[in-house]
Image (tube, helix red, strand yellow):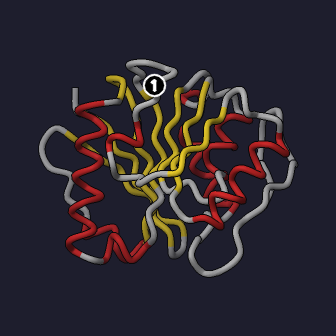
Amino acid sequence: MRIIAGELRGRRIAAPEGEGTRPMLDRVREAVFSTLGEHVEDAVVLDLFAGSGALGLESASRGARSVRCIERAKKALDALKLNVTELGVQDRVRVVRGDALAPRSWHDVELGDVRYSLVFLDPPYPMIEDPVERTAVLGAIRKLFEAVLSPNAIVVLHVAARAGEMLRFGPGLEHEMRVYGTSAIVYVTAQH
């Protein structure tokens, strides 16, 4: 995998070995960042289920002010830390081992009462297909908007295309879904 655009364009990033992680295809990542456009510039980013960090690192390359990557799996965490070091972005990208759905993982003591403007949420596909885990993911999205997001924040949720119809965000949130082959990207925002 490579960084697609920005100051780190063309630089390789390591992906963890094994079936546990599923990196977003380059063409889907490119479509996501094309859709986000200028929203990435100077953004405060939260990358949940960060894996190799491809989304967070792409954000940093495209001018995000800071990125907080949350990952729990050891192999993915090792690849993520290596990528941050190899790319030399330790000043802007912070790696945290933790539960992506736990609010305590979102809070950054160093940044104080930070408000994120962009969140990437890329849970394993089976989480969305399981009713209990899907409820936890959707509940976390609601908590993000209530607790740590700026008013015009965007949550970018990556799910299997077949699971897109299972998503119910509830009152106060609106969403737009775009399908790319077997992947769906759902852009969630607060109603104003």
The disc labelled 1 sits on which kind of residue?
A: Val
Residue 102's x, y, as percent?
33, 49
The residue that label 1 is drawn on is 109
Q: Position of residue 90 (x, y in %)?
A: 73, 33
Secondary element type, mark 1: loop
User: Which residue is at 40% across, 24% downward?
Assistant: 115
Q: Residue, x 71% and y 50% (percent of image)?
A: 81
Residue occupying image coordinates x 50% and y 56%: 49
The N terminus: image quadrant: bottom right
Q: In the rendered image of this protein, does residue 101 appear above or below residue 107?
A: below
When asked about the image quadrant of residue 41, the answer is: top right
Q: Residue furthest top?
A: 112
- The residue shown at (82%, 32%) is 7
Expressed as whole percent of the image width and height from the top left, the position of residue 163 reads: 34, 73
Quadrant of res 171: top left
Which quadrant holds the C terminus?
Answer: top left
Q: Badge 1 local density, few (<14 within 10 Å), some, or many (20+)? A: few
